[in-house]
Image (cartoon, rainbow, N blue to C red):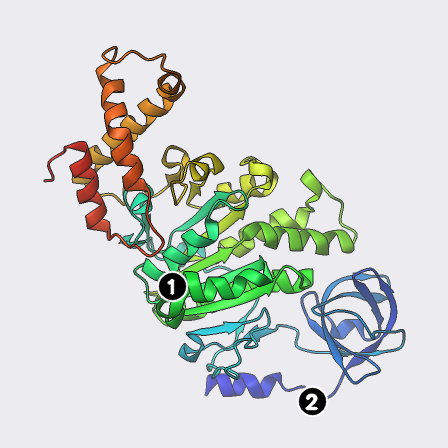
Amino acid sequence: MRGLVEAVEAVPDREVYGRVVGVRGLLVEVAGPLGAMAIGGRVSIETAGGRETPCEVVGFQGDRALLMPFAPLEGVRRGCRAIVGAAEPGVRPSRAWLGRVVDAMGDPIDGKGPPKEGPLLYPFRRSPPPAHARKRLGAPLDLGVRALNTFVTCCAGQRIGIFAGSGVGKSVLLAMLARNTACDVAVIGLVGERGREVQEFLQDDLGEAGLARSVVVVATSDEPALKRRQAAYLTLALAEAFRDEGASVLCMMDSVTRFAMAQREIGLSTGEPPTAKGYTPTVFAELPRLLERAGPGVGAGTVTGIFTVLVDGDDHNEPVADAVRGILDGHIVMERSIAERGRYPAINILKSVSRTMPKSTPEERRPLISKARRTMATYADMEELIRLGAYRPGSSPEVDEAIALNGPIERFLGQGKEEATRLGEGYAQLASILGVSET
């Protein structure tokens, strides 16, 4: 009943419109009833061919509203009608959305027809739950990837980032997590993805089993900046809807960097001053507003957020990576040098951190993890000398042990994309490698 009332109230009692008076690059200037428009509101521009170009209000200048389009501007001319739409656009998801692939507006692109809508409207832009009302993080979450389960243990409702350069294996790791993580629903946002790779991701990486419990939001790299940004907002809105139903939701986004780039395009078009690497101030304002929406809710449901960050030139201290690292609850670092020697996923364990550890690790497992980390750190410190042959065996028992264990640990950290290792199995395998008896 509540959803029906909202739908009836949303029907306008009259049509309000302005007129296009100018186009500057990606910006459309509209004169008319400015009082009926608001930042983030929708406006549809009618073209001569009867086509409508959806736009969003992104600013005001003098007596004109500034719009950005969700579609190409071909056919838009001076004098076109600009019809004012919903001030707070949103989406009405339901369980029927599982197994579906939609675009940034929530429209299906898998050829299966419109999914059944739910009763409640979830705005694309929504504030996170109040900090004082949120539940605490849940129990340790089984991700199915043994390197993460053992060394970067996550809890239900945690937010963690995957930081890597291009071509290092972020998308494959995401697919492994989508298939193997112990959750009820997965919401996957492909923001600025290559169009060629979408079908490969759906069919080869995600597969039928992974897609059956997922909703995939797609905005390819050739789409307008507004649509790429919108895909990120829709991804979080869908995750929030399933969380409010009490579900354990895995929300994954590839990538936050492309969301930031889209926001940079929008900001520069509206006249914002560029700052670090050309990113505008709104980029660093929007990042926490987006990422804070993931996490525990006020009820039983949780949104566990896994966000990839495409580091520019393999520089893990570039502005977006640095900002995101400070917002999230941990980071997974993937390195090209590890991928080049053939170990996948190419995770650098010593540089990866989960802020819920050691709380999320059982007390009896902590000595095991500490010993493994010390062994890897010892080998990393002496690696150059070992490879050059400058280290003489017997000089240090700790280094000798690290050399002996390096091969087995490397094999433990590597994992095929079709392989899944449960949380307890990973601890048992690591204990066997280190010769530690399990208690």
Labelled pair 1, 2 in contact (Cβ < 8 Å): no
Which quadrant, please, contains the N terminus? bottom left
Left or right, residue 67 beside residue 165: right
Q: Residue at (27%, 19%) from the top-left corner?
A: 399
Tell which of 317 and 347 is nearer to you: 347
Is 287 rendered above or below residue 341? below
What numbered label is drawn on residue 249?
A: 1
Rounded to the nearest whole Å, what is the CA distance between mark 1 and mark 2? 38 Å
Residue at 68% x, 46% y: name it.
Answer: 281
Q: Which element is circle 2 on?
A: loop
Q: Amino acid at mark 1?
A: Val
Label 1 or label 2, whichever comes before in sequence order: 2
Dot 1: element: strand
Query: Above or below — where is 244 with respect to 290?
Result: below
**Residue 164 at what x, y percent from top left?**
50, 43
- State the residue at coordinates (50%, 72%): 101
Residue marked by disc 2: 13
The spot of residue 314 in percent (x, y) is 55, 37
Q: Quadrant of residue 360?
A: top left
